[in-house]
Amino acid sequence: MNEPIRRVFGVFMVMLLLLVGSTSWWTIVRANDLNHKHADQNTRAQLRGLKVKRGVIRADDGTILARSVRTPEDIYSRRYPTGPLFGHAVGYSYTTSGQSGLEQYYDDDLSGKRGDVETLLDQLRGRSTEGDRLQTTLDPKAQQVAIQQLAGRKGSVVALDPRTGAIKAMASVPGFDPNDARDPQAFRRLQTDEAGSPLFNRATQAGYPPGSTFKVVTTIAALDSGKFTPQSQLDGKSPRTVSGTPLQNDAGESFGVIDLTTALTKSVNTVYAQVAERVGAATMKDYMERLGFDKKPPLDYPRNQIAASGLYTSKGKRLSVTSGQVDIGRVGIGQERLRVTPLQMAMVAAAVANGGKLMKPHFGDKVVDADGRTVRTIKPEVYSQAMSASTAAQVRDMMGKVVEEGTGTAAALQGISVAGKTGTAEIDIAQNITQPWFIAFAPKDNPRIAVAATVERTQGGFGGVVAAPIAKAVMESLLGG
Amino acid sequence: MNARNRELLALVPAALLLSAGFAAVFFSRDSLVGGLNGTNTVSDVSLTYGGIFLGLCVAAHLVLRFTLPNADPYLFPLVALLACFGLVEIYRIDDGLARQQAQWFVIGLIAFAATIIVLRDYRKLERYRYTIAAAGIVLLLLPRAFAPTNGAYLSIRLGSLSIQPAEFAKIAIVVFLASYLRDTRQVLLLGSRRIAGVTVPPLKHFGPLLVVWGSAMVLLFFIQDIGSSLMFYGGFLAVLYVATSRLSFPAIGLALFAAGAWALYQIRPTIENRVAAWKDPFDPSQYDKPIGGSYQLAQSLYAQADGGLFGVGFGQSVLKLPAKDCASTINCSLLPAPHTDFIYAVITNELGLVGACGLLCVYVLVLQRGFKIAMLARDGFSKLLAVGLTSVFALQVFVIVGGVTKLIPLTGVTLPFVSYGGSSIVANFVLLALLLLVSERARREA
């Protein structure tokens, strides 16, 4: 009977091997999926996070934006001392509400997640796990000014340093206090506020029509492709037939033959539609992509809180600029179905300001461990050489004229030259509802700050009147300090 | 070196594991206290449970030294290793449970010694085989008289004690099968006819085999316990195969079982629910069911995924939900029944695939010793008894580990010697005693 016994043992060996196999399946093959993609059912990571003292998040002047406090139940809970000031940028981190913003993007650092070996070494050394600290580039004073200037109107302001891509201010109104995300009921109210959508970050997620601010993009394509110069003479007669329908200048004003600089200064639609048509869709697409359109900007921010700027169909699908259905003349003046984020328009201004070199935008400056040692520095990185330095200089001078004598005079600063471009997108012509814009950088000849400001659905407000003063105040705050 | 000295030496790893494990839990108690990881209070006193357990191992060794000097020297140390593994893990989950578990080990070892002394000549069991069989079936059906837990009739309550009679029934049934098949194996073989190339047993003896099949079906139907019936029936098939050396017998048996199980699946909603929960445990409609859903299986798989290759580390498993008034870990556990059914998931969570494989390796060694004893045994009854006991032991491991790793539908049985549970420990120590008795006889004669 010994041979059958041996075989029975063999069968059981195979069964135990199957057990090793099924254990491997869950611990190795499917582990990543189960650990990261089932957050609603698998709360281990979040529960474990409660035992870790997350690192603080600081503004560039050292102001604490987020810190962890120990509760009587011996777990940690997040507090945001500056309340609603940086609600969108910093985000929140709670077991019940999940995570958003920098809290989510830098979660591994803030919660002190390191490699297996390092964790093991830490345990052997008897060191408790404490998260790393995040130093950001955010400027509380400028942020304060941006929110005050929006004065409760729905809209957004983004200000960044064109030389490095460091974001200094990012305001989105209405905002929210991340401390409210601690209370499930208050968080629910934030989530269900359809009218205000306070959790929605307008600076990175909203798709607004850019209006005439987009003429800066058209100008870059026109000059850098060599097809035009600032002195190119074009007919500014209004109306002009573009793609079979008449296009008018603002207030129906007709111009004679004018050069491109004048056309930008006075924001002449009929000239820019011709320019875009002659530059062509393929070249426009090329320059838009160099400036960051058609892709989510490489911001250190959760991907689901960033939207790509570009053309969208009425159903929200992406549309290529080179598609036959696109009226390229109207794209050139920021109409058609263009949808852009304030962050994207700030990047356009920044590319011009930095001699054509577009830097990747970022919030993070460095990650510092609990003992004060720098773990990692977030270095400035080039996104693209969007245009040549000479093109950038030409566009800069043209934008300077806009603020000196054109539509953007309201942004002029005392003793500092500003370059900018206004925009007034028509949302509802019958009810005269507009979306005013202003993008700018300063000082014109040595730019240290680039900004985009916009307000949603104003009653006939113009970019030069409504948005330019907001941008001006934010630049003043950042350059004065 | 003689067998017993080898045994004593082989107890050293178990002692080291226990000491190291208890020390690890003890020293990490600061991070465990009141936290989310588990143990609420780890008192200095509880360290002594480890000491008591080691003392018990030495005592059991002395019993073996005097009563069974020639028995297999590795089986007891291997079991002690498993028990240490379990005791440390239970201590880490809740130190109050570890104290009770240590008490159960005392009772288990008394049963172990008693079995060895009373059944010095275990072959007299053969005389009472029908009585034993009847007792086994009564034990199996007993829980039916009590209220079900989680849709299955697995345990009965006597005061504060919860007893799982199936643990004892498995031994009784194996004893009966070994004895019965030793008698009838010749007739089964001689009376068989070959029909279309398949050896079919004679109809006359088909009866008793059908009774066993019927019992398994009844078990499935009344107890609604796929795991236990798989365990018993699998043990039966193993013994039947060894007794007859005909592959067709277990093959026919397996086909009958599959047919019966399929038929029951069609008519019993409980079984159907379990299979549905097994098929897609992450489906919210199954996961969110208050009763009979897949919550526990899904959490078991999440716990294992969390462990990965090396585990999150000893004492680092997230077991407890953050509730304020929580007397014990098991009352507000993220993973239900972490100390019994799902202890394998907790071990994988903390020690990873590596630790789980280590545990399975110990089981492989136990099985190897069990089948080795069967091969060395001289007479048919001893061989079949050893095969049967080892097989039900192996199947129990397969049923619970296969269940928590979603290899097969989940049934709550204990992980032998590792899970918390009095019935399981006592019954498995009796099983171990029987194996050592068979071994003693085989090796003494050799």
Image (cartoon, coloured by chain):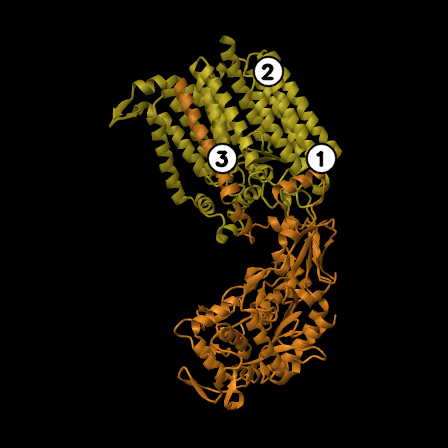
Chain colours: A orange, B yellow
Q: Secondary structure at mark 2?
A: helix
Q: What's the residue type where badge 3 is placed?
A: Val
Q: What's the residue type where badge 2 is placed?
A: Arg
Please say if the residues under marks 3 and 2 sit with CB atoms less than 8 Å apart: no
**Residue drawn at (60%, 39%) of the image:** B350
Q: Secondary structure at mark 1?
A: helix
Q: What's the residue type where badge 1 is placed?
A: Phe
State the residue lying farthest toward the left.
B196
Q: Mark 3 to mark 2: distance in Å?
A: 30 Å
Where residue A470 appears, as percent x and y from the top left, is 66, 77
Where residue B98 appears, as percent x and y from the top left, is 66, 33
Q: Can you say whether A294 is above or below B443 in the image? A: below
**Circle 1: is it few (<14), some (14-19), or many (20+) Cα within 10 Å?**
some
**Circle 3: is it few (<14), some (14-19), or many (20+) Cα within 10 Å?**
many
Q: From the image, which quarter does the N terminus of chain A lie in?
A: top left
The answer to whether residue B28 is seen in the rendering is: no
Task: Name which quarter of the figure residue B90 lies in.
Answer: top right
Residue A20 numbered tag: 3
**Residue denoted by label 1:** B26
